[in-house]
Amino acid sequence: MDITTESAGLAFTDAATYADREQLHRGLALLRKESPVHWVDAPGFRPFWALTRHSDIMDVERDHQRFVNEPRPILGPKVVEEEIARMAAAGAGVRSLVHVDGEEHRSLRAIGAGWFRPRAMRHMEEQIRELARRYVGRMADLGGECDFVEEISLNFPLYVIMHLLGVPESDFPIMLMLTQQVFGNADQDKSRDAASPESIVAAFQEIFGYFAKLTADRRSNPTDDLASAVANARVDGEYLSEQHTLSYYLILATAGHDTTSAALAGGVQALADHPAELQRLKADPALMPTAVDEIIRWVTPVTSFMRTAVEDCTIREVGIREGDGLLLSYPSANRDEDVFAEPFRFDVGRTPNKHLSFGFGVHYCLGAALAKMEIGIFLSELLPRLAGLEVAGEPVLTQTHFVGGLKRLPIRYELSR
Ligand code: HEM
């Protein structure tokens, strides 16, 4: 089918396009070339500008006073955005780091920032390595064939983040189900009732209920986990409001899970699809840091975030009006020919690698160091034992507008004991 800038623009609102990477990237390449600041007016969505060039996305993220996150940080169908706006007007709903700007954002971010600095993450290293060994051991137990998503990549990052939050292991399965309902909501397989606002609101409410109990517990019995830090944080001498506290847990539990799962599974698929790169990394483990960044560029688990212009302005001579929404297309930025030499080549030694998978600027991913550590440690436990790896069936991608990656990755492998 011929792609036009119009059909490529409509693809941002079509969850199915994100499950077909070839078609997605053909459209994004066309937009970068012919309409890098593109107006999208799709049925069922409020209109917005789609930005597809790396430099434009960086400029917008850098200019965080002119382009703000509130009130529309994430693209959703109009009915979902309206429901969220109604809840916000009533003082309810989610008010996490990604929903706020300015001083409110700065003070909330400071609470978690210390926990996620690379140096502070070092104390997590042994715990994560232990979990990674457990999961590589599980691959060995499965006898050389498994669905890598179902058995490994869905669970390992969830365990890491739940440990960090101090959630007991017996509650992990319910958290897994709820976070998938919130994030994978456009996919029939994963939600109670695909894309219905009620199903998303119901999943949010269950997560909120769970975390309300956690807060009460940590306030009466403080520990040294991240949940305690959030529950007992004070801004201007006061505890965070209930809305801020619960939103904080929610963003940590959800943002730290599906994203890293998607990167890990996509990374294993990329290594299986590029045996020479897999051999190169096995032969030279010092390449692990560049390999991890390349995997995160290659997969780009987050499809986009949004900003709203607070005044009239121009981008590439296109007039943007106050109140217009701007979609930042990270998969497009990460294949931008002006920034990446041979962007469609998977290169475990790629340097420099200025990918935007973690965003940029004041909202830059808080968990970037943790995510990289998890993927690096898992692969450094897996690779020395791996004698063979191949994709053994059709990999299937989640249908989503937001965070997504593989929902099935059948693999065949040989692991030494
Ligand atoms: C490969 C894995 C991950 C990817 C691709 C990813 C991607 C992103 C992106 C694109 C943003 C928005 C940045 C922007 O607006 O400029 C973000 C924000 C955020 N991420 Fe991640 N993320 C990952 C893993 C994690 C992990 C493991 C955590 C922590 C548990 C985490 C926590 C957060 C938080 C709290 C924010 C909000 C930051 C803010 O608004 O100040 N992420 N992430």
Image (cartoon, helix red, strand yellow):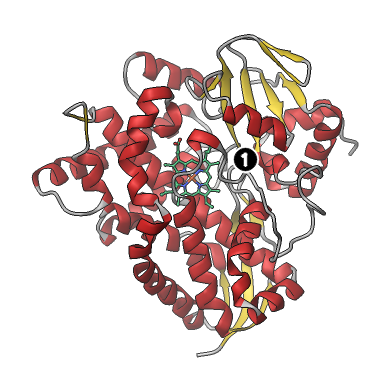
Residue 40: x and y in percent read 72, 22
Q: Is residue 350 left or right of residue 104?
A: right
Q: Is residue 87 above or below residue 1?
A: above
Q: x, y (%) of residue 11?
A: 73, 33
Judge by depth and name the residue closer to the eye, 151 or 267: 267
- The answer as to whether callout 1 falls within 8 Å of ligand 1 is no
Residue extending farthest to the bottom is 417
Q: x%, y% of residue 396? A: 65, 56
Residue 74, given in percent of the width and then of the height, sits at 53, 30
Residue at image x 62%, y 27%?
60
Can residue 1 be seen at all in this image of the molecule?
yes
Describe residue 195's horizontal placement relative to residue 346 as left or right. Answer: left
Q: Is residue 278 above or below residue 81?
A: below
The reply to whether residue 77 is in sight is no
- The residue most toward the right is 2
Quarter location, residue 51 = top right
Q: Which residue is mark 1?
A: 303
Residue at 68 percent across and 43 percent down: it is 331
Residue plotted at (62% across, 67% down): 268
Q: Nearer the viewer, residue 273 or 396?
A: 273
The relative height of residue 353 versus residue 136 in the rendered view (above or below) is above
Q: Secondary structure at mark 1?
A: loop
